[in-house]
Image (cartoon, grey):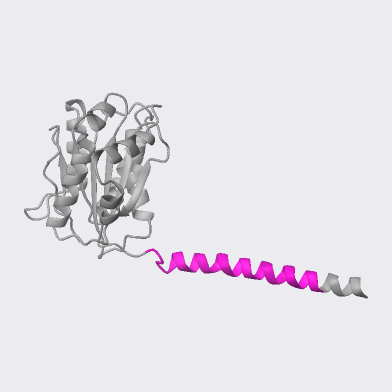
Amino acid sequence: MNFLFRTIVGIGCFVALVGCEAKSVQGEAEDRAGFAVPAADAVTSVVLDVSGSFDDKMLGVDCPAFKFTGHLLQEMQQQGVGYNSRLQISVICGRTNPVVFDGTFRDFKSTFRDVDAFRTFIKSKVDNGGSRVHDTVRDAIDFALESGHVVPGVTKLGLFVVSDFEDTFGDTTTLPRLEKSLQRWAERKGVVGFYWVDNRFRGRWTNIVGSLFPMQGNMKRGIVSTDATVQPDIPVLLR
């Protein structure tokens, strides 16, 4: 009798536990579907090339990567982008999970109080297995659009890549896949800026960006530049 009672109670507890776990999983799914992640005023995706010789160029003594990101944040604030906006940083190297930072502008400033903190963090994420340019930029776009922070007609989008755009990692399929992701970005009224582009690839990217991101009135939606500067022109984010 006691054995039967304990067995029934045990089965009842197990069923209740399974029910609670199922409810918890369902609740999490409902939260995700209901935008539990807050919508951002803007999502700024920065992609930094730290592969091969670009490691020294980006993270050397003056750390242009840090200066570029700082200039970008100042420009965003001048454009009136709110503090709830997201900054996402990806690194081009051999990493297959290139997004290394995702937080608010305030999070960035509190996390990286100086250039040394930023350089140390980025260096810890570098994988010297190649220069995965096309797939990294595509991953950055897809991550931003699928992060839950983007609401069409509300969230402004900016993609800013610092790279020579020499891809040594992919095959003939990586560029077409990237173009499809760029098309998605364009359809969401995103803007792009490609900087430090090697002259060998400038023509290709000028054509692609010009086709997908045409001028809107007198405003540029896309910029392709070979200038190695940490204070480039930044297109105005659109809604």
> If the image is split into quadrants, where does the N terminus sit?
bottom right
Please determine whether, in this image, residue 146 is positioned above or below residue 48: below
Name the residue nearer the viewer: 179 or 239.
239
**Residue 121 is drawn in which quadrant?**
top left
Query: Which residue ends up furthest to the left in the rendered image?
Result: 218
Q: Position of residue 197 (x, y in %)?
A: 19, 32
Q: Residue at x 29, y 36 (%)?
A: 119
Q: Residue at x 86, y 75 (%)?
A: 5
Q: Quick check: is 28 in the magenta stretch? A: yes
**Residue 52 is drawn in which quadrant?**
top left
**Circle count:** 0
Q: Is residue 3 left or right of residue 220?
A: right
What range of the chain is rendered magenta? 9-37
Q: Position of residue 217 (x, y in %)?
A: 8, 55
Name the residue nearer the viewer: 155 or 21.
21
Q: Position of residue 13 (x, y in %)?
A: 74, 71
Q: Is residue 2 visible?
A: yes
Q: Quick check: is 17 in the magenta stretch? A: yes
Name the residue nearer the viewer: 8 or 41.
8
